[in-house]
Amino acid sequence: MMKLKRCPGCLKNGFETYCGKCRKKLFDGKNVSHILSFNRPEFNRVKRERSGRLSISGIQIKHSLKLEGKDLKLTERGGEYILKPIPSGQFENLDAVPANEHLTMQIAGQVFKINTASNGIVFFSDGETAYITRRFDVKKDGKRLLQEDFAQIADRSEDANGINYKYDFSYEEIANLMMQYVASYKIEIEKYFKIVLFNFLFSNGDAHLKNFSLYRNDEYGDYLLTPFYDLLNTSIHTPGESELALNLFKDDFMSQDYESTSKYSIEDFKEFGSRIGISQDRTELLINEMKKEQAQVFKLIDSSFLTDELKIKYKKNYEERTVRLKATSNKSVENKPTND
């Protein structure tokens, strides 16, 4: 069995497989191995034989798994987990995608206390790395939560809105939809602001409409944000892409910083917070909280499954974005639009 020096769930040092806390979160305490019972060629063969029916929608290849005893098995029905192997394509450093997503999700959950789907690293029996996440929409009795992503909520589809339907929107417009459908908006909107800011800090340029969802709370019948998922530092794979997947604002507003540099800064996020109904004091508090945990972020990066070269790149991207959240010269913003 492949032995590790850190937990492939939380990345805590001194473990040769999942620690007790991660076993509980991922597998309800069962002693599940971090090594799958099948290798990548076997996985590819099963996929071909089943004509792709295992695939879950999305650009990155995803497949359903079910826990049978202590073994994770490929399944067509009743999936409890999603397995993401190394994808293929023309982007850079694709063999690091599982480690990248795992690290980014762990930073969000551990450091910034963002509600994320439980996740970990697994290995095919031939040693290839993959990412696994537990489905939060599956209850213990096997029933599914009523969940809709914001492409569905906004009634946008490729047929109706074109191939870029997931991207031709803004984060402000998502907030407007939340205001319409989420009764506890004042609480949930701060969680939303925090994840948008997180995606900026960690260079996630693919946080599109389908990567934000609401679910129905069975107890009260209201709608809340689901745990967050698909968090990835995309700059490692697609350098030079847009800073955010969507525009921050629904109009052509630009802060003076953005107008002069074409890059977002603290002034843009202050304006964004104001527009979506967060007070100035709370906005500044949330921004400050996201700037002060650099040592803990670096510790997780160093413990991750990224190569040393990519760890350096990951840190550099994060540091550059953090600098832009430092206070500017308090320049006034000209022609600031008023909220309707």
Image: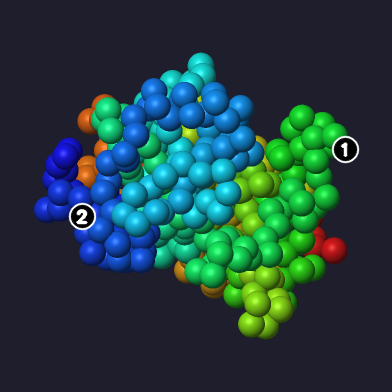
Report which residue position mark 1 lands on: 160
Indicate the position of residue 272 as horizontal and vertical percent values. 65, 57
Q: CA distance from mark 1 to mark 2?
A: 46 Å
Residue 193: quadrant of the picture: bottom right
What is the secondary structure assignment of the residue under circle 2? loop
Colour mapping? rainbow
The residue under the point 85% across, 34% down is 159
Please state which of residues 289 and 68 is positioned toward the viewer in this rendering. 68
**Can you say which quadrant of the picture contains the N terminus?**
top left
Indicate the position of residue 144 as horizontal and vertical percent values. 62, 63
Query: Tag 2: residue type?
Result: Lys
Position of residue 167 relative to residue 240, above or below, is below
The residue under the point 38% across, 47% down is 72
What is the secondary structure assignment of the residue under circle 1? helix
Left-right relation of 123 to 231: left
Q: Residues within 10 Å of mark 1 (few under 14, many from 20)?
A: few
Left-right relation of 210 to 296: right
Q: Is residue 229 visible?
A: no
Position of residue 208 relative to residue 159, above or below, is below
Report which residue position mark 2 lands on: 12
Q: Do labels 1 and 2 touch, CB within 8 Å? A: no
Residue 2: quadrant of the picture: top left
Indicate the position of residue 101 as horizontal and vertical percent values. 42, 42
Position of residue 268 relative to residue 111, above or below, is above
Query: Tag 1: residue type?
Result: Ala
The residue under the point 51% across, 16% down is 90
**Can you say which quadrant of the picture contains the C terminus?**
bottom right
